[in-house]
Image (tube, helix red, strand yellow):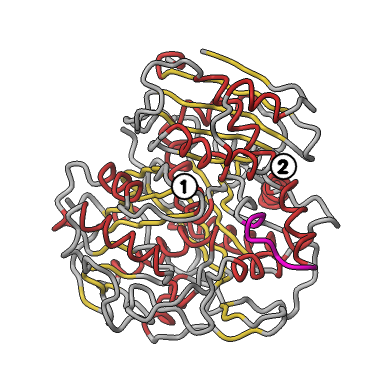
């Protein structure tokens, strides 16, 4: 089967706008989570500054910014006839509902136009696993043989619509969230955009085009990260609560780990929303998949739940962490709060392994797993 | 390859009584989910081994508007008391979950949005989804319901061999 590589990344987050600066921020324990009071009830969230922004859509603004960073890093021409675009977002421009066409398809069209992409864009909106499902869709487009490069963008902005909805479900914590912790009491919402350029070849044209003033692309040539395999599975159980047996998450893990020795994995970067049910469900799925000893980390304590961006943002940071020889800490975790236990990485740890699994779950009963591996390591 | 449609404006409670009748959760669903649920009932009625849990059937729903009709209902409730019952349907993929739950489909479920029914993009995406080696068949639906009374709703039951 055709191999699929990540040859360029871009991120827009409240703690930095390049993978390198965001990685450094996470290592330093920085977060933008704070309490906001602009809804009837307060909420803790990690939001981007709108300072200096004017335009019809902040969502599309940050999505473009992340995509351009990834395109420049990859050194591809987005207007090429064999370049595809996949957008991952859950609520898009929903804050403008009733005032504008807030369809996700319209956002994808405008993004394609702004980036110069000539092929028809596709939106993947699979609740909280959207980012991972979009990466999987990009992989499949490359493997179909119809595309040389696929730009996969994940973006989410918060609004009264989303905040009051999660409040109505009693899913939000008023404190910085505590993934997998005994005292966890809900999630925080977050804003971010993240993008990857996927390619059938590990070569990055950036090496040729970029002058010294451009940041050197670390995914170039011989050391590109490979997106090895991905799977999406449904719990077939409940639309807004995870399976008690971790069914879909376990099935997704089982698919991507077929023939893979868990010893090869540096870590599993879990969903870890810090709701009671999600983290417990993931612990069961990880144990069922034989991953109870593999280090586990979650990044929601830094970024909150960035929804459509989460799968891509958290995968990018996981690649950069592996490249730096580390497993990122799980901000907010201090005492094991799931049973059966998993090997939560509380503090930063060293690793020399070059493979990891990204895991996500979401409403609608969806679960996704994606295996990343670098440079033929096995 | 089996294909079914629900004409715009058809009475969904009537279709429910005709094709299902034993699943009162239907009445809690948004229009997008109701249409997806009914299309699937029409496709798999009488299928041998129905309701036996299976991982080899994917559910792939395509749309332009997604769940925006329901989003407007939720937005209206915000002014008064935000409704959790409406909020859970503010995701375009809930319809795929409803179909999975009803039919015990534990395989892939995905919601895709595109700017109008683009047949080549839709079928390319379906074909690509069969790269998952477990998937042997798929419920594929195009459901676009800008309102609760007007829609385009059609679905296909595709076997892996149909695409070869």
Instruction: Tell me the quarter of the picture where residue B47 sits.
Output: top left
Residue at numbered disc 2: B65
A325 or A239: nearer the eye? A239
Please tell me how crowded label 2 is: few (under 14), some (14-19), or many (20+) other residues with Cα within 10 Å: many
Q: Is residue B3 left or right of residue A114?
A: left
Check the picture and name the quadrant holding the N terminus of chain A.
top left
> Tag 1, which chain?
A
Residue B86 covered by magenta stretch: yes
Residue at numbered disc 1: A133
Magenta range is B80-87
Q: Is residue A61 left or right of residue B40?
A: right
Residue A23 in view, yes or no: yes
Q: Residue at x 50, y 56 (%)?
A: A128
Mark 2 element type? loop
Query: Does A218 sit above or below residue A288?
Result: below
A258 or A142: nearer the eye? A258
Residue that extends furthest to the right in the rendered view of this protein: A99
Image x and y of residue A190, in percent: 56, 71
Query: Does A30 sit above or below residue B90?
Result: below
């Amino acid at each position: 089967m055709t191999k699929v590589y990540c040859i360029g990344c871009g991120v827009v987050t409240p703690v930095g706008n390049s993978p390198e600066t965001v990685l450094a921020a996470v290592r330093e324990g920085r977060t933008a989570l704070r309490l906001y009071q602009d809804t009837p009830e307060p909420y803790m969230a990690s939001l981007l500054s709108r300072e200096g922004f004017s335009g019809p859509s902040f969502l599309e603004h940050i999505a473009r910014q992340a995509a351009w960073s990834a395109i420049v890093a990859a050194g591809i021409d987005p207007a090429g006839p064999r370049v595809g675009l996949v957008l991952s977002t859950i609520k898009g421009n929903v804050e403008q509902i009733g005032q504008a066409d807030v369809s996700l398809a319209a956002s994808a069209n405008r993004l394609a136009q702004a980036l110069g992409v000539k092929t028809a864009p596709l939106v993947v909106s699979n609740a909280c696993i959207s980012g991972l499902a979009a990466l999987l869709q990009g992989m499949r487009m490359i493997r179909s043989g119809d595309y040389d490069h696929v730009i996969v963008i994940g973006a989410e902005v918060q609004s009264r619509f989303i905040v009051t909805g999660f409040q109505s479900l009693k899913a939000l914590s008023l404190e910085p969230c505590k993934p997998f912790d005994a005292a966890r009491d809900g999630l925080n919402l977050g804003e971010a955009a993240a993008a990857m350029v996927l390619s059938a070849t590990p070569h990055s044209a950036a090496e040729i085009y970029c002058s010294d003033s451009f940041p050197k692309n670390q995914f170039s040539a011989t050391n590109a990260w490979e997106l090895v395999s991905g799977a999406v599975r449904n719990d077939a159980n409940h639309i807004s609560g995870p399976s008690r047996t971790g069914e879909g998450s376990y099935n997704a893990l089982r698919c991507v780990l077929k023939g893979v020795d868990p010893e090869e994995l540096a870590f599993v970067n879990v969903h870890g929303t810090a709701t009671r049910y999600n983290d417990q469900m993931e612990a069961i799925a990880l144990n069922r998949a034989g991953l109870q000893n593999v280090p586990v980390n979650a990044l929601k304590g830094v970024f909150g739940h960035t929804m459509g961006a989460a799968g891509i943002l958290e995968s990018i940071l996981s690649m950069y962490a592996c490249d730096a020889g580390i497993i990122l800490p799980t901000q907010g975790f201090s005492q094991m709060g799931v049973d059966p236990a998993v090997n939560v990485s509380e503090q930063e740890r060293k690793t020399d392994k070059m493979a990891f699994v990204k895991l996500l779950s979401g409403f609608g009963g969806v679960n996704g797993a994606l295996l990343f591996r670098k440079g033929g390591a096995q | 390859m089996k294909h079914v449609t629900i004409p715009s404006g058809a009475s969904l409670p009537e279709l429910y009584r005709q094709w299902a009748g034993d699943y009162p959760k239907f009445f809690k669903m948004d229009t997008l989910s109701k249409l997806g649920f009914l299309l699937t009932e029409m496709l798999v009625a009488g299928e041998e081994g129905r309701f036996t849990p299976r991982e080899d059937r994917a559910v792939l729903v395509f749309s332009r508007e997604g769940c925006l009709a329901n989003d407007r209902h939720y937005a209206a409730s915000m002014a008064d008391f935000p409704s959790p019952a409406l909020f859970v349907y503010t995701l375009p993929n809930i319809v795929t979950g409803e179909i999975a739950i009803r039919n015990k489909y534990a395989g892939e479920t995905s919601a895709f949005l595109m700017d109008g029914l683009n047949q080549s993009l839709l079928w390319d995406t379906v074909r690509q989804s069969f790269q998952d080696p477990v998937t042997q068949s798929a419920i594929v639906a195009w459901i676009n319901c800008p309102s609760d009374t007007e829609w385009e709703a059609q679905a296909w039951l595709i076997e892996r061999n149909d695409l070869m």
